[in-house]
């Protein structure tokens, strides 16, 4: 479980760094993207994470991201989302194993 927690935390931090650097480098583009997606005018971390997930994992095209550093690092963003999801799965598997072990006693 601790390995899963560590992987999930590292993935989440790296995702926040990638998306945060894209937002700070291209604030107008990110604000326009969030406004078009009907999120708040001011970028909020949760809305940035949702857009990042849709862009990297679901491969949704966003014209506002064209030419930004986030476009160049799309595969890295996908990798960190995958690592975060693997960490979550490992934690859930650890909990399931603990429950199964407790019931067998």
Image: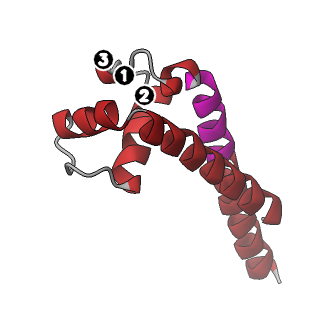
Where residue 81 sits: x, y (%)? 59, 40
Per the picture, the main secondary structure of the magenta-coloured stretch is: helix
Residue 77 position by quadrant: top right
Where residue 67 sits: x, y (%)? 44, 15
Q: Is residue 35 above or below residue 71?
A: below
Q: Is residue 63 above or below residue 98?
A: above
Q: Which residue occupies 23% across, 33% down?
A: 32
Q: Which is more foreground, mark 3 or mark 2?
A: 3
Classify 10 Å Cα crowding around label 2: few (below 14), some (14-19), many (20 and above). Answer: some
Q: Horizontally, is 25 left or right of 36 in the view? A: right
Q: 105 or 42, which lies in front?
A: 42
Which residue was labeled with disc 2?
Answer: 55
Which residue was labeled with disc 1?
Answer: 60
Q: Horizontally, is 23 left or right of 9 in the view? A: left
Q: Look at the image and give the residue range highlighted in magenta.
A: 74-85
Q: Which sits earlier in the primary sequence, circle 3 or circle 2?
A: 2
Q: Are marks 3 and 2 in contact (CB under 8 Å)?
A: no
Label 2: which secondary element = helix
Which residue was labeled with disc 3?
Answer: 63
Q: Which residue occupies 82% across, 58% down?
A: 3
Where residue 26 sits: x, y (%)? 40, 32
Q: 74 or 105, which lies in front?
A: 74
> How far separated are the C-alphas under marks 3 and 1?
10 Å
Q: Is residue 105 above or below residue 78?
A: below
Q: Which residue occupies 29% across, 34% down?
A: 28
Q: Are marks 1 and 2 in contact (CB under 8 Å)?
A: yes
């Amino acid at each position: 479980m601790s390995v899963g927690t560590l992987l999930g935390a590292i993935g989440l931090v790296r995702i926040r760094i990638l998306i945060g650097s894209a937002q700070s480098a291209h604030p107008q583009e990110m604000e326009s993207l969030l406004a078009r997606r009907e999120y708040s005018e001011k970028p909020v971390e949760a809305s940035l994470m949702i857009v990042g997930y849709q862009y990297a994992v679901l491969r949704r095209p966003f014209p506002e991201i064209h030419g930004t550093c986030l476009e160049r690092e799309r595969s890295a963003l996908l990798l960190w989302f995958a690592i975060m999801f693997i960490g979550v799965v490992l934690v859930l598997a650890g909990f399931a194993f603990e429950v199964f072990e407790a019931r067998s006693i």
